[in-house]
Amino acid sequence: MESQPAIHIEHLVKTFGGLRKRKRIQAVRDISFEVPAGTVYGFLGPNGAGKTTTIRMLLDLIHPTRGDAYIFGQHVHRNHGVLRRVGAIVEGAMFYNFLSARRNLEVLARTGDHYDAARIDSLLEQVGLTPRAGQRVKGYSTGMKQRLGLAAALLSDPDLLILDEPTNGLDPSGMHEIRSFIRDLADRQGKTVFLSSHLLGEIEQICDRVAIINRGQIVREGVVADLLAGKVQLHVEADPIAQAAALLNERWPVVSVNGGLDITAAREDMPHIVRRLVEGGVDVYQAVSQRQTLEDYFLAVTGDGPAHD
């Protein structure tokens, strides 16, 4: 594994719009983070948070207003050749619809001067497309195109993969296969995977570290296990519910859900929560805890409260 980070972003800013201040949109606001080599790194954020803009600057597809982006220690704009070490899917995989999956990969490989028929066959098998490799892409589902996009991103055997919503359009079985495949790329092949996804359960299962971006700013960054350590989601059924919420929300984040309350707290706070309610004259009928998920954590730090089906 390389000692230097696979990605280093330093005070990156991107502003769109004209000279008039009122019409400017600051899509990315002074963000900095590092992606250790050989890891799977999740980049999370609501729609419009700045994820794709950041990825496009990282790939030198657009230039930052300020700041710098480095890949394996090389400035991506000043040392464009470092992008040869990168494979990417950004904003969906695009192919020639009139060609088969195999022919599309052959064209891409020859264009990039890394044609290897055996590798193409191997990649088609790894992403589960061998039985349909001779079919025109025109007849492919979104999920099949995503699989083909992953194979295309790996054609040059890159050290870094940048994937935007890699499991979009896949059924649960396909998502599991691709998750395992991505994890294997890091664990067995030593590759670095930087992926953006709105499927937070997926991120929690396969990522070593995550950065959460909201309104163009990094609001949390760290090892997934550390971010979730010690936090629980406590669901309380009590009466009167309004009084219970008033007693608790000065100290703990409280959200009303299905006639009860959801409280995010440290595990050691649970007895204090129940005691506070009882001493405050509230009848507690049920208090059930579960470990906080990454989805709960994400929604809490982006200001939307816990998520529920």
Image (cartoon, rainbow, N blue to C red):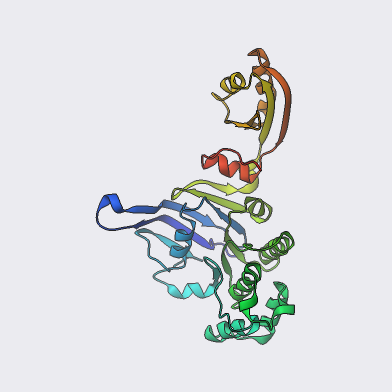
Outermost residue, left side: 20
x, y percentage for residue 144?
Answer: 66, 71
The front one of 277 and 218 is: 277
The front one of 206 and 282 is: 282
Q: Is residue 279 above or below residue 40?
A: above
Could you tell me which residue is drawn at 67 percent across and 56 percent down? Answer: 206
* Visible residue check, residue 63: yes
x, y percentage for residue 200?
Answer: 62, 51
Outermost residue, front side: 139
The front one of 308 and 265 is: 308
Residue 24 is left or right of residue 176, and the answer is: left
Residue 241 is left or right of residue 75, and the answer is: right
Q: Is residue 150 above or below residue 176?
A: below
Could you tell me which residue is drawn at 52 percent across and 85 percent down? Answer: 111
x, y percentage for residue 56?
Answer: 45, 64
Q: Is residue 181 above or below residue 50?
A: below
x, y percentage for residue 151?
Answer: 63, 74
- Residue 177: quarter of image: bottom right
The front one of 67 and 232 is: 232
Quarter of the picture containing the N terminus is: bottom right
* Visible residue check, residue 267: no
Quarter of the picture containing the C terminus is: top right
Number of disc labels: 0
